[in-house]
Image: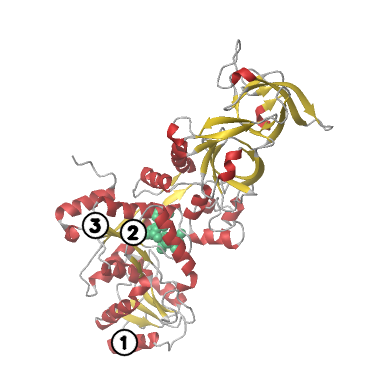
Amino acid sequence: EKTAPTHFIRQIIERDLEAGKHGGRVHTRFPPEPNGFLHIGHAKSICLNFGLARDYNGLCNLRFDDTNPNKENVDYVKAIQEDVRWLGFDWQDRLYYASDYFEKLYGYAVELIKAGKAYVCDLSAEEIREYRGTLTEPGRESPYRNRSVEENLDLFQRFRAGEFPDGSRVLRAKIDMASPNMNMRDPTLYRIRHGVIHHQTGEEWCIYPMYDFTHPISDALEGITHSLCTLEFEDHRPLYDWVLDNISIDCHPQQIEFSRLNLEYTVMSKRKLTQLVDEGLMSGWDDPRMPTIAGLRRRGYTPASIRTFCDRIGVTKSANSVEMGMLEACIREDLDQHARRALVVLNPLKVVIENYPEGQVEMLDAPNHPKDESMGSRQLAFTRELYIDRADFREEASKKYKRLVSGGEVRLRNAYVIRCDQVIKDDSGEIVELRCSYDPDTLGANPVGRKVRGVIQWASASHGLRAEVRLYDRLFNHPAPDSDKSVDSFLEHLNPDSLQVVEAVVEPSLGQAVEGDRFQFEREGYFCVDKDSRPDHLVFNRTVTLRDTWAK
Ligand code: ATP
Ligand code: MG
Ligand code: MG
């Protein structure tokens, strides 16, 4: 039984397959420019392109769209491959670079010149802009528009030979200066760039093809059937089709546009992410506050949670902004099921169990997951001196407060019920220690004759381990930091409290945890071991809190 396609691109593909269009094949590509790390918006495109190939027995290429050498480098090329693989997708032997096609692209440009459909233009960039006209006014034709084919061929060869300085001339398509579509008003196809070393082709070229010329040809050369891109390219589609219709190439992929992902409280443009890194506002592209794949990975997100998110947001043509809570819900669901539980005290307050023998250590067995026995158990060390969280004690509180109060009882998770007998304060009145007693009959059993409802986490003072815990909050305090015209820069909306570092006490078993291990710190949230963590200096990142703290 066939299920209905879940979004409009699937509908198009299924119709095409039924009609035998594109030879009944599905072949997509993911075409990042290696000028930064991939972000969660790219994940949407990756899941879409690779997901369609998987679901329709097709293929998906990874292609570096590398025609803009000054901002690109091999570190980005490497990071992008790592991130696509980490997300769970595989291009197998279909890794391409648009720069692989420079020679062919040059040939197609020559073909356009010979057909009288491209010309060398000596106007400056500013003049070209001026001549282009506006949405309400047609453009003017360049005085160089009617150069002879011979002259154009000669000049274009000398372009390549390096005879002309940067910006002195460009190659333009000869289309229609009166077109209502600005992209069709004799767009630039090639520009001159001397002195840059391209990460793939070195110094071989001093002319570089523009995106609008490169992209359709790269797609066609690779036999792409459906070329998916974001909505900004909708009015570039006539140019995409024009290029392919005017050169001798058989394949004509179909460009389909969908809306880009915007996420609240963050920015997604690579230019802005680069700025955050370059200005030292973030520790790097993989800072756990960054919306990059590398940042999310370091933050503790799983590939599955990101794929689930991309499924849930769907694919449409309407621009919108997705709530951060939606991404967080995906990782919460994944970790609730798969993360080991652990007891960690983030704001330690000393507790002395006065009726517990000094020097005694009891190893208590605690299940790693309350609903999954197959995850096994670990040992907690119970000792006379412990820590509980400061937030779990009040001298006085109403009945609604289900934690520890003076004279009251509370259960220590996976251990005993204790009662607070005395509160010790320093000279300034701050509580520094609680003197308590424990009920030895309450290990795995309810106390006799009374009800104790609260349960709190704890850690042994002598056996627990010190750890640095990094608590993250939203990176910006404005839902759309880069669309607020009332400030000079999106940076003005940076949240100064996006990172808070605390010194915590963690249960002994966490001493064995290694980079990337994920846990639920009970009652606190989900955490993972950071790459900075060392056996003698444990570091954990908070991936997400237990409940949605973003809800209004
Ligand atoms: P930026 O404006 O941040 O530089 P870009 O679109 O230029 O982004 P590319 O590396 O060219 O970045 O993007 C590669 C692919 O990922 C493109 O096909 C693009 O459409 C897609 N993509 C980029 N950002 C998003 C997003 N926010 N949502 C969905 N797809 C995206
Ligand atoms: Mg791009
Ligand atoms: Mg870009």
- In the depicted view, which residue is nearer to us: 323 or 341? 341
Label for residue 457? none
Amino acid type assigned to the residue bearing label 2 in the image: Glu
Looking at the rendering, the quadrant in which ligand 3 lies is: bottom left
Residue in the image at 48% along x and 78% along y: 196
Query: From what the image shows, is residue 132 above or below residue 418?
Result: below
* Disc 3: which residue: 26
Residue marked by disc 1 = 153
Q: Depth check: 225 or 429 in front?
A: 429
Report helix, strand or loop for mark 2. Answer: helix
Viewer-nearest of discs 1 and 3: 3
Look at label 1 and name its amino acid. Answer: Leu
Residue under the image location 57 percent in, 34 percent down: 379
Which class describes the residues within 10 Å of circle 1: few (<14), some (14-19), or many (20+)? many
Q: Earlier in the sequence, mark 2 or mark 1?
A: 1
**What x and y, as percent, mark residue 249?**
22, 72
Say if disc 2 is inside 8 Å of ligand 1.
Answer: no
Residue 18 place in picture, x, y as percent = 16, 52
Secondary element under disc 3, as helix, strand or loop, is: loop
Where does label 2 land, which residue? 234
Q: Quadrant of the N terminus?
A: top left
Residue nearest the observer in this picture, 470 or 281: 470
Sequence-first tag of 1 and 3? 3
The amino acid on which the numbered mark 3 sits, given as a three-letter code, is Val
Secondary structure of the residue carrying tag 1 is helix
